[in-house]
Image (cartoon, rainbow, N blue to C red):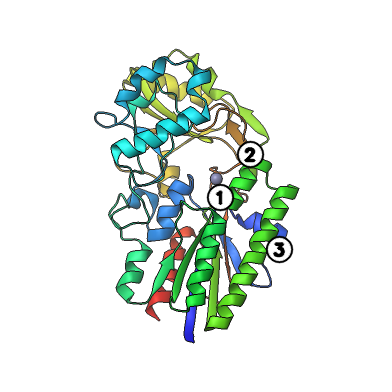
């Protein structure tokens, strides 16, 4: 019997407010606190969890960016003439996404979402490589898994492409073998279920109950194969029910600025990011956006404080952010309303992530603090 295992469990969108309200896994994981999240999405947060670096240092934020040179999507230009109903169909977009990923050798998560085909030739995709594999982080940081390999301790991790049930089954097999001392379990079902049904719904209750039972059972199994079992459950961000749909995008389109001539923009679900091709467009856009009540323009000082002032303005020169519970409908990410969403001001209570453990560790007050805990588990 081995002395100890550290099981790190990532649960996408298990917000602190949600965990507290549900008193989730409080018996199993009594050491718990709010963990501050970042501006952005899982695409911002997960590289920080894996490296301990801030977004402006690891270089990841959101998927779509203004193309600096020739766009990898340039050959999709002919599809821009397709009627929106056909072009927006998810089956068609999934097929094109798969084909694009294969053609360009992308190994990371790739999905075209609802980005209009006519806009794609101006854009590029930021997460081309698998961020869980060596060399996957844009800023060149090594992930926790490379550090674990260096430590010489046996370790294992989930395949993020698989469903939670498969990843939990894999974790169980590894624990039963009793060899690994470090395990990283990736789960994303809570995120999917809450997006679909909202933060409070019988289906969400079911998903939490099932997840809770899986954690108990995993802990029980581990205690039969290891003398000491340390379990750490954490998330990247929270989730908020959507109460307001913003039609800022169609209103913006009526302003008359020309995409690709005056500006480039990416409309994420809760944030619009702009690059300007002439100063007149920048002035018109800034003054117009300032007048709109849907959300707020973020200042450079705010972006700096969020660790998201990217030196090359890779993710946009101007950021417009919606308040918690609002959603752009449509956006480049979604055509229709989504029941719950994340990606708001990180300081909002519904945005905060959670840190839940069965032991005292180094303090985890923000996402950058998770990496040192994972690293120290391999050192002692
Ligand atoms: Zn999500």
Direction right: furthest residue = 202
Label 2 close to label 1 by CB (< 8 Å): no
The location of residue 323, given as percent across then percent down, is 59, 38
Residue at point 68%, 35% (across, down): 243
Mark with earlier residue (3, 1) = 3
Give the answer, above or below, for where 80 lies relative to 215: above
> Which is closer to the viewer, label 2 or label 1?
2
The local secondary structure at tag 1 comes to: loop
**Residue under numbered circle 3:** 23
**Residue under numbered circle 2:** 325
The location of residue 80, given as percent across then percent down, is 40, 18
Label 2 close to label 3 by CB (< 8 Å): no
Rendering quadrant holding ligand 1? top right
Mark with earlier residue (2, 3) = 3
Mark with earlier residue (2, 1) = 2
Residue at point 46%, 69% (across, down): 183
Give the answer, above or below, for where 50 lies relative to 309: below
> Which is closer to the viewer, label 2 or label 3?
3
Quarter occupied by the C terminus = bottom left
The location of residue 53, given as percent across then percent down, is 37, 57
Within 10 angstroms of label 3, few (less than 14), some, or many (20 or more) residues? Answer: few
Direction left: furthest residue = 69
> Which is closer to the viewer, label 3 or label 1?
3
Q: Picture quarter containing residue 82? A: top left
Residue at point 62%, 51% (across, down): 349
Q: Locate residue 96 relative to residue 325 in the image: left or right.
A: left
Near-viewer residue (230 or 298):
230
Q: CA distance from mark 3 to mark 1?
A: 21 Å
Decide if residue 313 is in sight here. no
Q: Picture quarter containing residue 231? A: bottom right
Within 10 angstroms of label 2, few (less than 14), some, or many (20 or more) residues? Answer: many
Decide if residue 23 is in sight here. yes
């Amino acid at each position: 019997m081995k002395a100890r295992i550290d099981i790190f469990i990532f649960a996408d969108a298990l917000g602190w407010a949600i965990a507290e309200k549900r008193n989730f896994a409080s018996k199993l994981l009594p050491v718990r606190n709010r963990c501050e999240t970042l501006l952005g999405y899982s695409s911002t947060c997960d590289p920080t969890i894996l490296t301990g670096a801030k977004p402006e240092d690891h270089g990841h934020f959101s998927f779509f960016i203004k193309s600096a040179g020739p766009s990898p999507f340039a050959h999709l230009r002919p599809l821009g003439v397709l009627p929106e109903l056909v072009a927006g169909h998810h089956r068609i977009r999934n097929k094109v996404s798969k084909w694009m990923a294969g053609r360009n050798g992308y190994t990371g998560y790739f999905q075209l979402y609802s980005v209009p085909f006519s806009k794609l030739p101006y854009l590029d995709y930021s997460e081309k490589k698998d961020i869980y594999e060596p060399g996957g982080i844009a800023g060149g940081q090594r992930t926790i898994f490379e550090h674990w390999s260096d430590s010489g301790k046996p370790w294992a991790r989930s395949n993020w492409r698989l469903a939670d049930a498969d990843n939990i089954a894999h974790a169980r097999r590894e624990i039963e073998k009793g060899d690994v001392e470090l395990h990283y379990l990736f789960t994303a079902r809570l995120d999917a279920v809450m997006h679909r049904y909202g933060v409070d719904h019988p289906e969400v209750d079911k998903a939490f109950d099932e997840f809770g039972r899986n954690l108990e059972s995993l802990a029980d199994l581990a205690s039969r194969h290891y003398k000491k079992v340390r379990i750490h459950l954490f998330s990247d961000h929270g989730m908020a029910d959507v109460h307001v749909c913003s039609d800022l995008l169609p209103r913006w389109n009526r302003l008359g600025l020309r995409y690709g001539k005056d500006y480039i923009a990416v409309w994420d679900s809760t944030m619009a990011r702009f690059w300007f091709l002439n100063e007149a467009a920048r002035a018109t856009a800034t003054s117009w956006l300032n007048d709109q009540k849907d959300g707020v323009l973020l200042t450079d000082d705010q972006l700096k404080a969020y660790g998201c002032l990217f030196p090359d303005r890779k993710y946009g020169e101007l950021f417009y952010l919606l308040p918690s519970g609002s959603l752009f409908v449509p956006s480049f990410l979604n055509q229709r309303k989504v029941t719950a969403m994340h990606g708001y001001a990180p300081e909002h209570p519904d945005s905060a992530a959670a840190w839940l453990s069965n032991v005292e560790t180094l303090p985890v007050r923000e996402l950058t603090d998770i990496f040192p805990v994972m690293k120290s588990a391999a050192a002692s």
